[in-house]
Amino acid sequence: VEEAAAAQATDAADLLTLAGDCYARLNNAAEAEKLWARVVKDHAAQPAASAAALRYGDALAAKGDKVGARAQYAVAFRNPQLAAPDRDLLAKKMIDLNQELLFSRKPTPDSVVHTVQPSENLTTIGRKYKVEPNCILRVNGMKNTNLYPSDKLKIPQGTFRIAVSKARRLLWLFYDDSVAKQYEVAIGKEGHDTPVGEFALAIKEVHPNWTRTTEDGRREVVPYGAPGHMLGSRWMGFAEPNRDIGIHGTPKEEESKIGGAVSKGCVRMRNAEVEELFDIVPKGTRVTI
């Protein structure tokens, strides 16, 4: 700790993280957490901040502070230099926490509890809180849409966004800064690369028709369920000028190709998983590829 006071930022972050580890080995949890928190706060731009945030998150989780732990794991996950195994570990930790913090009736600081009034339904409640009706259904573990006056519903108030890694063929659903879900996806094949950049969901369709471009340049509509239809059960299309690109499902016979580069530029998912994602995210959701 004394050496860290006079060291350059990178070395200081490493030294303070190591000092925290030493205190943890000496069973002095309070001092360990204090140093890890100091690295996260004062040296956020340094690589060691991810390690410190992970350790601090584990300490908070062990004490039962799951909201705090989730926040620290999110800090660690943001490091662009994070190795794939470390990123996978952090994603799993956040997904496990969000299963309890987000996808349950447990009250949390980022949610409100709504008491159902006579004549209300999931659509009217969702409109009131700007949340997808089926998101409310999934968060509360409901088997159907039946509501009764005085029922208590948990309503998430955070922001959902999507990130896709082409290299890893993974899609992450974020709730604020934490990973809530992770899905394996397929991306565009050679000559039909999935575009990189920032996009927004402009269209959401259940059982969509597929408008494809034929070899002679014509636009041809393939109805949902017809032979050759490639969109699966859900379509979430991007805003202009990328209206032909989006996130969609997959015919059952094609689901074995998830994880490959096989689409015409879209992000392709398994049907059960795209249906889950479709229920949760609203139009306008930001997508980073």
Image (cartoon, helix red, strand yellow):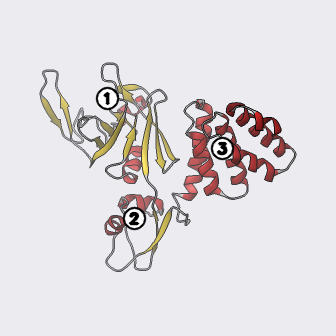
Q: Quadrant of the N terminus?
A: top right
Viewer-nearest of discs 3 and 1:
3
**Quadrant of the rendered structure where residue 77 is?**
top right
Q: Which residue is drawn at the image coordinates 42% and 31% (left, top)?
A: 256
Label 2 Cα crowd, 10 Å radius (few <14 / some 14-19 / many 20+): few
Looking at the image, tell me whether mark 3 or mark 2 is earlier in sequence order: 3
Give the SS element for disc 2. loop
Q: Is residue 183 above or below residue 218?
A: below
* Label of residue 42 in the image: 3
Report the Cα–Cα distance between label 3 and label 2.
48 Å
Give the SS element for disc 3. helix
Who is closer to the viewer here, 162 or 2?
2
Residue 186 is situated, as x and y percent measured from the top left of the image, at: 40, 31
Q: Is residue 120 left or right of residue 31?
A: left
Q: Which residue is drawn at the image coordinates 41% and 29% (left, top)?
A: 257
Looking at the image, tell me whether mark 2 or mark 1 is earlier in sequence order: 2
Who is closer to the viewer here, 139 or 252?
139
* Label of residue 103 in the image: none
Q: Which residue is drawn at the image coordinates 41% and 49% (left, top)?
A: 276
* Label of residue 265 in the image: 1
User: Taking the image as drawn, is residue 10 in sight?
Assistant: yes
- Report the amino acid beneath label 3: Asp
* Residue that sits furthest to the top in the current view: 190
Q: Which residue is drawn at the image coordinates 35% and 67% (left, top)?
A: 122
Report the Cα–Cα distance between label 2 and label 1.
35 Å
Q: Is residue 230 left or right of residue 155?
A: left
- Asked if labels 2 and 3 touch by Cβ distance under 8 angstroms, the answer is no
Q: Is residue 276 above or below residue 141?
A: above
Read off the residue under disc 2: 144
Give the SS element for disc 1. loop
